[in-house]
Amino acid sequence: MKPFEYASPKTEKQAVGLLGKSWSEAEVLAGGTDLLALMKDDVVAPKRLVNVKHIENLGEVHFDGKEMRIGALVTMGEAADNALIKQHFPILHEALWEAASPQIRNMATMGGNLCQRPRCWYFRNGMGLLPVDEKGESLVLKGDNRYHAVLGNHGPSYFVSPSTIAPVLIAYGARIRLYGPEGARQLELEKFYRAPMHEGEREHALKPNEMITDIFLPAASTRAGYAEIRQKEAFDWPMASCAAVLEMNGSTVKSARIVLGQVAPVPWFSPEAALHLTGKAVTEETAMAAAHAALENARNLGKNKYKITVAKVAVKRAILNAAKEGA
Amino acid sequence: MNEEDRKKPEGSGLSRRDFMKIGGMTLAVPMVASPKVLRVGGEDVEVYGPEKTMVTLNVNGKLMRAELEPRVTLLDALRESFDLTGSKRVCDRATCGACTVWLDEKPVYACGMLAIDAQGHKITTIEGISTPENMDAVQKAFWENDAQQCGFCTPGFVMATKAFVEKNPHATLEDARKGLSGNLCRCGTYVGIHSALRQLTGMKEA
């Protein structure tokens, strides 16, 4: 790890004042579970770490019946154990419970999870988020791309968005609050993620001198289902995941929000899948039709064709789990 | 080999660790700077490092102080500065669990946290849960069920297991597999660890 300065501000305003105009100047330290590993491997080398854990009021979960507010510093473990989250947003509880290991969940924060960097092995080995050879050709396309994107993969980004809770939060219609030098702004979580076009750009809309302070979830009477498909039973990022939140009208689907994880550079919102469910009852057939629709535009990069099949299964299972929930 | 023999190998009268500490002392020139104060948002904020700064940790109920750079992890501080070498450094990437300690009673990876960031918390290491004469129930269960081979993952596994069984006294084997998924044993002693868990929780044979 390269040497760095360290500060523990007490307010958002102080924190933002300590952050820099570029990513090389400073990084936000919360749980540190991803950041410290990236720093040890010299993938990032900030000159200053701004520990935000001493800022008050960012470590709580509140629910007023209409909206849930989850502070960015709530740990994944605290959120997984939270009874209100389990009751009102059951698949968030499920995804949190499945994520990482107990030790990681005890340190990692909700805000940090949303900002975790991709697991792409080229990126983790210091070759950049959009790794290219001396001729400018993508290393992902000619190399080992077995875990890379099958959707939204027309370049130059081929990595996959790593967070498992982001697709779930997006399916529930989450917004986040960001705080920066100009004050606070709110953003739909869906719009927070983006596929960089140039090396050096990040995969999210956060500016180098901004931080996530809160996550907001609107209460709704919905049915939700979640599914992950992994190589390891625990402590592994999925090959594909899916969150399905259905608004029902009797036994038929009034509207649906289907979001896939680990298949694209961003959490992949699929209106096509939702369209195949709208006005229909949830059955094996409609769920499978929605799954096919979600992956209709998928593209095999050479070694990740299996992910298209796996992602379809995740979509189908998530929808069927949603229909089962509370039934 | 008894404990005394291990500390003082025959001939030298010094252990490898003692030797390295003496070597380190003659080379290290302490460079401790007081924090610089930045005016941010109309208020003063102390900024530490990148040079060494005084770090005070509450480890196993004792206050321990050392001059450390901000980049030193909690694990390296425990091992190198406080001579608490029970927590092991294996992957150093918050993956294997060999460095598991408790931060305010919750298991965490000591390699995944900065020492300077651990200030103000209650840290418990394997050295803090028992003495060689008076083993903890989890250590005893590991010993009785042959739940270790090379032993390198054992301190971390014991810390994770103790936290798990205290939170889940009636766990099933499936709960335990998930609850201990943050620790790896390369010797593959999981069968012994599961036997130890059965003894500790009274869970039925799977």
Image: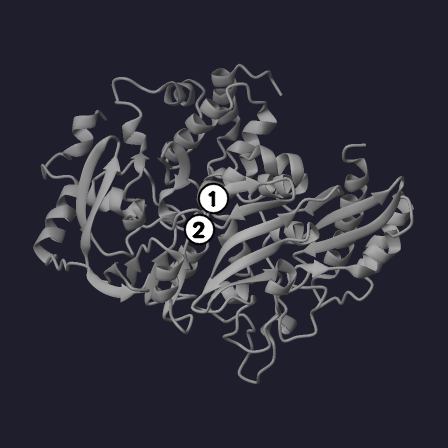
Dot 2 amino acid type = Thr
Q: Position of residue A17 (x, y in %)?
A: 35, 66
- The numbered dot on residue A104 is 1
Q: Position of residue B24 (x, y in %)?
A: 14, 52
The local secondary structure at tag 1 comes to: helix
Q: Residues within 10 Å of mark 1 (few under 14, many from 20)?
A: many
Q: Residues within 10 Å of mark 2 (few under 14, many from 20)?
A: many
Asked where in the image residue A187 lies, by quadrant, the reply is bottom right
Question: Along the line of sight, which residue is nearer the eye, A239 or A178?
Answer: A178
Tell whether label 1 touches label 2 (CB within 8 Å).
yes
Residue at horizontal 67 percent and vertical 41 percent from the top = A91
Q: Position of residue B20 (x, y in %)?
A: 16, 48
Residue at horizontal 39 percent and vertical 71 percent from the top = A24
- The numbered dot on residue A220 is none
> What subunit carries mark 2?
A
In the image, taking residue A91 as reference, residue A201 lies left or right, namely left
